[in-house]
Amino acid sequence: KWPRGDEKTWKEALRGVATDEPAITKAIVNHVQTSLARQPHNLDELGAYQAAALSVRDNLIVNWNETQLHMTRKAPKRAYYLSLEFLMGRTLDNALLNLGLKNKYSDTINKLGFNLEDLLDQERDAALGNGGLGRLAACYLDSSASQELPVWGYGLRYQYGIFQQLIAPDGQQLEAPDPWLQNQNPWELPRLDVNYEIRFYGHSERLEGGKAVWSGGQEVLAVAYDVMIPGYETRNTNNLRLWESKPKRGFDLNSFNAGDYERAVESSNSAAAITSVLYPNDHTTFGKELRLKQQYFWTAASLADIMRRFKNLDKPITEFPDYVAIQLNDTHPTLAIPELMRILVDEEDVPWDLAWNITTNTFFFTNHTVLPEALEKWPVPLMEQLLPRHMQIVYDINFAFLQAVDKKFPGDLDKLNRMSIIEEGFPKQVRMANLACIGSRKVNGVAELHSELVRTTIMKDFVELYGVSKFANVTNGITPRRWLDQCNPGLSQLITESLKIPRNTWLKDLYKLEGLLEYAEDPAFQRKWAAVKQSNKQRLAHYVETTLGHKVNTNAMFDVQVKRLHEYKRQSLNILGVIHRYLTLKAMSAEERKKVNPKVVFFAGKAAPGYYIAKLIIRLIVNVARVINEDPDTKEYLTMFFLPDYSVSLAEVLIPASDISQHISTAGTEASGTSNMKFCLNGGLLVGTVDGANIEIAEEVGENNVFFFGHLTPAVEGLRYQHSYHPVPVEQKSPALATVLKEVSAGRFGDPGVYEPFLNTVRQHDYYLLTDDFESYIRALSMVDEAYQDRTEWIKKSIRTAAKMGKFSSDRAIQDYAQEYWNIESVKLGDVNGA
Ligand code: 475
């Protein structure tokens, strides 16, 4: 029965999705006139982008709304992906491709006097993440929606995303804020009616039966902003709910009336501060109170929301895990575990043991790094003050847990110490990884090697306690929609033509790319394949020319390393290798040089603002580039660029243009890597260490199609021991590297002395094994040069590599989570309204 008013009146007026050109035109012009209050004569590209985006947004809202209604009616089990970071990038292009409207929009926009590609460039990236972990979350949302899975993301709506990187004249990184919300954001829907009060501080009073009352302190309001996540070629449109913090009331009226205006405004500012900025550290923890506030604010709001949705189902609380699965993206949302316990025990009157049973059947925990400096710990005094009730709950969980450990391993005090959630010391600390593991059904790493390292190092004791089946692997994946179809339309088109299947078929089942293997030997196909790469190289060259004012030789090999700056990722090895190549070229005669394979090396990546050595490495890269790019002897054969302000959008230009990319972490340190998959999917080859997902990529494409070098994971510990107790001078281990270090030290690339702190990390402890891997690295690069000389063979490798990337679709990864972890199924929205 029609719910309200006259059915015919409603039905005639309800808009569907604008899919034909006249409707699209009308929608855009309508937004120009009304939403933007502009006229054709004063409409600039930004305005045209906004009007187009608002019209696409209207379509998404219709689909989004119906999806939510449909899901509420069907009431399937849902999964929630809790992540402090969602590195989304731009939305318009992706939304048009997913809706299948790109061509129509392009034509329409032409008629309105603009160019779609130019309008796409007006959009600012949504950069609410640091790197791999945040971009993975974004790919997973795309795959969940595309596969019609009932998955929501929960995160924070930071006012400022990852900082903008500037490079000063002396080569140093400078940081500027990223006010990404400055122009209105068409991709979110403020839901001012969806809000929760979140408590901090105060005190907790225990009652009998394990319950407690937490009261007093400060209350902050969490307000929902919903971001629509369209699936590819489906009307299913999922939700990413981001929380914004606000003062509960405008300001504290008591202080205001007492004339204490400062205090009144201060407390309102401190509420707003919670979601003001993304922490720009990747792989380190800081122990700052504001960060802990962010974590609790976000997990408490998300759980309140999840609980409210569950309660609408009217099911017994014991069935919570039959309707809810929660994936913890690293330890950042671990407070969700004691928070769910608090809700169940204190608010829902569930007995402790039953509550614990519900909790441990709800959560799943993904670890993204085994680097010790990234393992989160929070000082007990800070937790006690900010979250007194949660600290009690953590102690109670720990008490029962340690009893169980003691029962299984009687008298093993060392083990109890290692496994305890509380680390003894001054101050005591809460170990979030232990809590996350204890409170979850399953723990997973993000590539085979990494998951094995999780089992044998940081989680070893827990494997002995729980058994190995709790510790599994889901190898990461990337969405082929953004990372091939969107960023490389030329290649996408060539693939579709050649496979002779519709584009949407292989984009939804990436294993279909294997069909390309039969063309690897076909010269006509090879030529087309090479032509696409060439035009992508020209696109990148154009970008470099317009941003850095430098011409780029597109006939040279393009060698790319783009990722966060970190010592373990060893951009240092790359830059020292470039210097070695430069010195070698300088030592050659002009005749000899002519035989050399010309190469352009690209770097991009941000360093955490407080990471001194990483920033020094950027400075070195920039200054080496300055010297070698101006050297008339060598610049024909070797040039180098550091592209400032790396972002998702810049990656979309860089990745399709690469001939070879570098993934050269010290073995055992890069959990997976995901850009390695993107480069290979776009027909770039890979030079790398035997680490992370590189290993599985090589398994797929064959070891003869990747360039591996360096020591293996089992050797690392011994080498580090040797560095500490039986150091061998660099001159002996690698004379070539010793020469490079000497040249840098002597000031060949800027003031002598500047780089000493970095050089000393190599000369002294060399924790990341540069001195051990340098020689084999240089050999690997020579093999790359040699392989590139035979261009036909190279193209074959490139085709075979892309053809074998099926495994690395995030669709596969999400299916794995859906089936092996969350136990959820697709719920497809019908073609007609709400069907
Ligand atoms: C791995 N970030 C990649 C990627 O699984 C992997 C840590 C602490 C605080 C803030 N951010 C972090 C990470 O740990 C991170 O990005 N890890 C990365 O996760 C996805 O592919 O190898 O380094």
Image: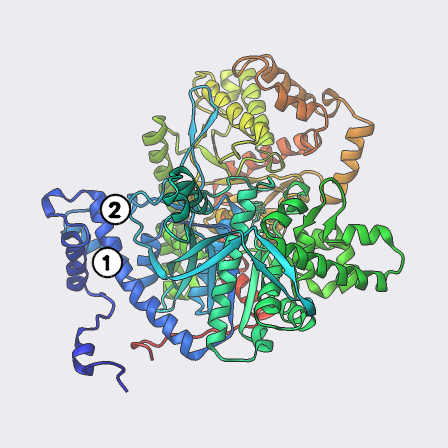
Observer-nearest residue: 451 or 165?
Answer: 165
**Label 2 sits on what residue type?**
Leu
Q: Earlier in the sequence, mark 2 or mark 1?
A: 1
Q: CA distance from mark 2 to mark 1?
A: 14 Å
* Spot occupied by residue 702 in the image (x, y as percentages of width and height): 61, 52
User: In the displayed structure, does residue 369 sit left or right of residue 6?
Assistant: right
Q: Residues within 10 Å of mark 1 (few under 14, many from 20)?
A: many
- Label for residue 55? 1
Q: Is mark 1 within 8 Å of ligand 1?
A: no
> Dot 2: few (<14), some (14–19), or many (≥20) neighbours within 10 Å?
many
Q: Nearer the viewer, mark 2 or mark 1?
A: 1
Q: Quadrant of residue 7?
A: bottom left
Question: Which residue sits at x=23%, y=53%?
Answer: 52
Position in image of residue 113 (x %, y %): 14, 47
Which residue is at 22% across, 65% downward? 18
Residue 414, above or below 148: above
Residue farthest along the front direction in this orientation? 258
Q: Secondary structure at mark 2?
A: helix
> Where residue 532 sits in the image (x, y, percent)?
37, 46
Helix, strand or loop under label 1:
helix
Front in this rendered view, residue 360 or 231: 360
Checking the image for residue 119, the label placed there is 2
Whether residue 366 can be seen here: no
346 vs 58, left or right, is right
Q: 679 left or right of 205? A: left
Q: Which residue is painted at 70% across and 60% down in the image?
A: 438
Residue 341: quarter of image: bottom right
> Which residue is outermost to the right?
411
Q: Amino acid at mark 1?
A: Ser
Quadrant of the drawing holding the C terminus? bottom left
